[in-house]
Amino acid sequence: MAAMAASLHAPSAHPAAAAAAASALRATRPAGSHEILAARAARDSARAVWLRQRWSGSLQALRIAQAGLDRASERYTLALGQVLLPARVPQRDRAAWTEVAMDLAGRGAWSKALGLLRGPLDSPPSLLPVEALAAGNVESPGAGLSVLGWRPDRAPKGVRATDEAGLYVAAALSDSAGVARSARCARWLLLEDRRAATARAWARLSLARSFSGAGEPLLAREILARASSRTNAETLLLADLTAAAGDTAAAARLLAAIAVRADVATADRYAAAKKAAGWLQGPAADSLGEREWMGLLRSLGDIGEAPLSLRLMDARRRGAPEAAAAAEREDLRASLLYKARRYEAAGTAYRTLLARARRPAASRADLALGLARSLRAQKLFNPSDSAFVLATVLDSAGTTREAAAWERAREWEDQKPPRDAALILQWARARIRTEPSASTARVHEAISWIRADSLAAADSALAGPGPEDARVFFWRGWIASALGDSVKARLSFRRAWELDPWSYEGVRARELSGLPVEAAQGMPEARVRHGVKPSSLSPPLQARVLDVVGFRDLSLETLRSCATGESEPRANGCIDALEEEGIFRVGRADLNLDLRLRFPPAFAGPVFRASEEESLSAAFIWSIMRLESGYNPGARSRAGALGLLQLIVPTASRLAGRAVTEDALLDPDLNVRLAAMYLRQLVREFGDLRPVAAAYNSGEDAVRRWTAARPRIDDLWVELIPYWETRGYVKQTYAAMRRYEAVYEAALAR
């Protein structure tokens, strides 16, 4: 389904290229075949080749198949625009011409689509909503409603299309005709219990907006309030309507319920928390119960609005209901001061709380850790060091002890000579019991000894008792190699690869030891490739109709249901359709076992074009895309980064040499092309892809500082990246890139 949408929206060709494509089309058309059908058949054939390579071919084969699909899609688009439609359609070709009509409607060629549907196809019943929308666009909204059998001036008896697509079109055409009664009637019918949940939610929201816009906010509010479950958009509107009615406290409670939910998207939580906070200024701040109020304050702090949370806290006049609640408020205030970067005030608050008696030791340990972090942020090394020690003493066996010990050791690692750092890391290891954290501390102790030019001490740190994971074995191999013990190095690297083959350390261990690439290493049941049966792949026609008429959410819901609930051949077809709509990693298979589903060649056309133009690895671009947006072309960050590779407007405009709008950056082609240009600039400066990834995440200036301090880019350089987030980002992108290469049998990137 969406392959057509993608191909039909391909960039228009240069006139000379278009003429050449038209000539090629005529030359390859079979005798007796209509040019449009021939072009469509060629496009479908190219798409089938692409799908075979997507699920079972190498990266190079996929690149060739994508180029063939691009050419065939361009020819089909050209034929749709330039070739006349037939006056009659043989019965054997009706199905093909029905698809052509859908393609024409999908690209907005309503006049041609209508001529085909009403003429040689004689109005197929399954496509009535499409025909109605075409008539509404070409003739008049009333003409479109007539196709559906819908009379705006009377109750909808004898309506020809009462499915979700037909009712959605009836509502849209009624809106265009300015017939509110008819539009509302269509939406009321979509509220029936037998309708899909997505359809009911859309109907509720649009009905509420309609009534609100018509000066009937109470009715709009009632429609939303009676729903047994609501989408976030519905709750936001209900809150607005409730606040407009004068009950800002109830409105704030509605939004507070969204703001505290961890399963809600950050953007929705942010919008809900900000709006709720705006309504709770002044006396309204006392309207929420203690638990609701504290939850909202924490949510504001979690989403980066600690200053606003503090202002809201100060607006509260209602006292704490009990001593425990009062203490909880004070603890939260200290935490918010730290998050708001008011470090001196946070330190004072933590000192005051620590000085009070009758606190359990574990609670005082948390306060000591907060004080240590506040002092560290003020670059007061000695006082913060003492506070870290105090936290470890107060919490004899809990997680605060581990966090304080590790953070103290990391400060020594950054501030003190390597030998001193190694000794403090030894001290920290004795206080860390959680295996992953203990392994991390063990590795960092060894790295500190390496920096102190004591490979023997580093080897000893890793050889003694303690948890052993891929990181430990990798650095054992690294040290053995540096000491000239190639046998021990190979054995250690092999063990690291076996324990965690697709971590950064596992991948590097394989590379340094020359072990063969095996995409399913560590997961013997994983599927790296599988065949496709094109004859069984067609997604439900209703999903395509819904998409063409504009009911995108319900179309995608239909495809998701198919992808996760149907048998494999049909599910694969829906997976393919979802992928071409920009939705990846949805399917019946276990994502961990179906590697081609887990690591999709997302937006292959833009990625391959950009990788060729900028001489970049396609696998590297996908690995960045994977972390930046999860392959979501509509992704937006709170910092203003947009699209697949999360570019900000100023950077994109600089790269493009012209002003680039936010909407333009959501276009996959432009986003990938500009991001690839930026990555190429970073490659020219830094060479190795690891500092390139670091610069993409944390900025060029930071990486310039790190490379100036340590010019040699190697595994030690990666492990010494000061920012933990950037260090993890570099490791994840590198490992994902190598996984892509293994899954698609690509030549290794440099």
Image: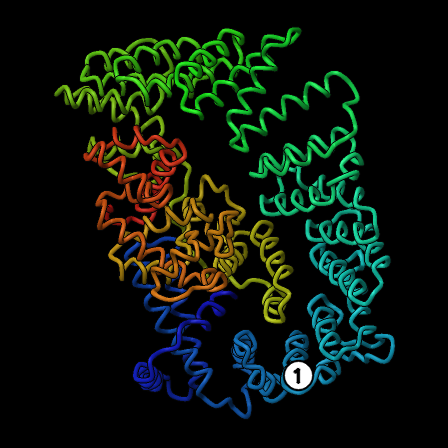
Figure check: 88 above or below 514 = below
Q: Position of residue 225 (x, y in %)?
A: 82, 50
Q: Which residue is mark 1?
A: 135
Figure check: 214 above or below 593 = below
- Residue at the image position 30 percent from the left and 17 percent from the top: 416
Kind of residue at disc 1: Ala
* In-front residue for pair 548/718: 718
Q: Position of residue 395 (x, y in %)?
A: 53, 9
Protein image colouring: rainbow
Crowd band around label 1 with a 10 angstrom C-alpha radius: few (<14), some (14–19), many (20+): many
* In-front residue for pair 749/600: 749
Q: In the rendered view, does 280 fall on the left or right side of 12?
A: right
Q: Position of residue 111 (x, y in %)?
A: 58, 86
The single residue placed furthest to the bottom in the displayed view is 87
Q: In the rendered view, does 666 fall on the left or right side of 608?
A: right
Q: Position of residue 441 (x, y in %)?
A: 37, 18
Task: Check disc 1 and report its element: helix, strand or loop.
Answer: helix
Circle count: 1
Query: Can you say which quadrant of the picture contains the C terminus?
Result: top left
The single residue placed furthest to the left in the displayed view is 484
- Residue at the image position 54 percent from the left and 47 percent from the top: 588
* In-front residue for pair 272/381: 381
Q: In the rendered view, does 469 fall on the left or right side of 681?
A: right
- Residue at the image position 85 percent from the left and 75 percent from the top: 157
Q: In the rendered view, does 745 fall on the left or right side of 326?
A: left
